[in-house]
Amino acid sequence: MKKVTYEAVLSALTEVVAAEVPEYSYEPKEGEEGTRCFYVWEGQPDCGVGRALHKLGVPLEALSEHEGVGAQSLLDHLELDEVIATDEQSKYMLRAFQRRQDVGVTWREALKTATTWYEDHSE
């Protein structure tokens, strides 16, 4: 099982955010269960968390198996499935990013919120 650190998650999220226009905000998709965010859409990583985890080596199939659950549950399932293990700081960052993304905040602002909280509380 691959273990990833806060620094690796921060790097992956930063790359994901940088790949989009500065004011990009995620648009939920219309699926069978209504409009919501997807980790994988049409065979590609979709939301910020899905894209970051895929950059960190999580297969799309593993992400797809857990569609519809929040970041914390996803990370718990991926660890139980022995796909990837994350530290508590990484879990917080991904949860915080997802929460902000899911209410329409730009990815840049979602990343800023997630990193600011961690940096303020890590000393």
Image: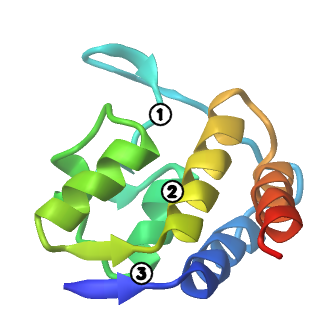
Observer-nearest of 26 and 62: 62
Q: Earlier in the sequence, mark 2 or mark 3?
A: 2
Quadrant in which the C terminus appears = bottom right
Q: Which amino acid does label 2 sit on?
A: Val
From the viewer's perspective, is residue 74 above or below residue 33? below
Percent x, y of residue 97: 66, 50
What's the mark number on residue 21?
A: none
Q: How many marks?
A: 3
Position of 5 compared to 21: left or right? Answer: left
Report the residue that reaches farthest toward the front: 123
Q: Name the residue under label 1.
A: 37
| Mark 3 or mark 1, whichever is nearer to me | 3
Q: What element carries label 1?
A: loop
Residue 108, image x, y percentages: 83, 57
Frontmost of labels 1 and 2 is 2
Mark sitting earlier along the chain (3/1): 1
How far is mark 3 from mark 1, CA to CA?
20 Å
Tell me residue 38's x, y (percent). Answer: 40, 39
The amino acid sitting under disc 3 is: Leu
Looking at the rendered structure, the kind of residue marked 1 is Cys
**Answer yes or no: do the residues labelled 1 and 2 have beta carbons within 8 Å?**
no
Q: Name the residue under label 3.
A: 56
